[in-house]
Amino acid sequence: MRTLALEKLRPEAIAVVYLVLWIPSIAMTRLVTVKGGLTGLEILPVLTCLTTLAMWSFIALSGWSRAAHTVRLASFHIPVPTSWRLVSALAATLLALSTPLSFTFPGVSIPFIQLLMKAGVLLIAPAVDLASGRRVHWYSWVALLLAASGLLIALRARGALNLPPLCLLVIAMYLGGYFVRLTAMSKAAKTGDPHTLKRYFVEEQVAAWPFAIVAGSALLAFGRGNGFDQLRWGATHLWTAPVLPELIGIAMLTTLLGALSLVILLNARENTFCVPLERSASVLGGLAAAYVLAALYGLPFPTPAELIGAAFLVAAMVVLSLGPRLSRQKLLFRRATS
């Protein structure tokens, strides 16, 4: 069986595909909740189980599992995370739970929640680079400043956060998960080696989603209150609901997005290059999804401030695409004239 070779594509090309896939993923999640009358907590148990199945299927069909550390169980070889990949799997569990929830809050626009969550990750990226002793190039700093400026414009235009407590908790889970995950990546996998990339993805993802199921099961068993009642209702009622095909589609898209995201983030370049590229693509996908939902289903259009913020993110992506080329040309010119 041949191995899927996403790592051979340029990060910028992968970011474009990543952006496009975000549009149906976000739009379907928003429709299932806001238009379908369900809450994020109600869809979370079934969506987590479906994504676990989709992720394990992708790992088996892509051939990437051959790069992972495995243990023998009967006649099967089961991938098992080791070292930093186990730490990253625990962090990815927080992302697995928080990402779909972030698109489900009524009154909180998709571009705004995307901008808000990505802002924190952008600030984390150079801190992780500096702590790990990785060089940060000039174009990465410029792109970081552009992306951060766009995020600040959108935040200032809103005037205040005024977010539901659960939304704030989701943001905290997301940022905490990314801080640990980027640190683990820098320690164990940002080498540019395709084998290392595939091993990291398989060992992280093969454990992260089952961890999420275990965490969700614990909440179902011991949690009390309205939020936990929503989780229990979703876990028992949505398996035969008309919305199940949409949830299957979201799970499949989530799996593909996870693979593309990791290929971008595990590029050998510094986090301050990879993170703005990956974050900008996801925010622009959210913006496009907001337009689709507004045009077809009557949901609110993005605000002018959110559009300005998106323009800054486009500029950041252009800088990240052209900066390395300009640096290489400058280096070649110096060598030719020296």
Image (cartoon, rainbow, N blue to C red):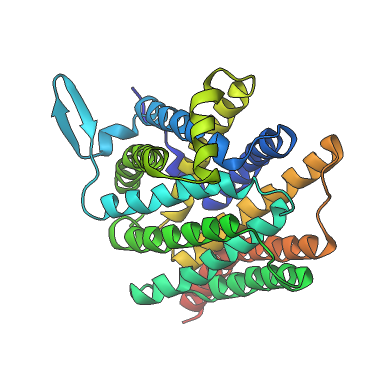
Which residue is painted at 84% across and 50% down in the image?
301
**Dividing the image into 4 quarters, which one contains the N terminus?**
top left
Outermost residue to the bottom: 338
Could you tell whether 182 is left or right of 246 in the image? left
Could you tell whether 5 is left or right of 189 in the image? right
Q: How many marks?
A: 0
Q: Is residue 10 above or below residue 137?
A: above
Residue 72 lies, in percent from the top left, at: 14, 28
Which residue is painted at 56% across and 62% down in the image?
276
Outermost residue to the front: 225
Which residue is painted at 27% across and 38% down in the image?
67
Q: Is residue 259 above or below residue 130?
A: above
Q: Is residue 313 above or below residue 45?
A: below
Which residue is painted at 73% across and 51% down in the image?
287
Q: Is residue 135 visible?
A: no
Could you tell whether 33 is left or right of 68 in the image? right
Residue 237 lies, in percent from the top left, at: 54, 24
Residue 289 lies, in percent from the top left, at: 73, 43
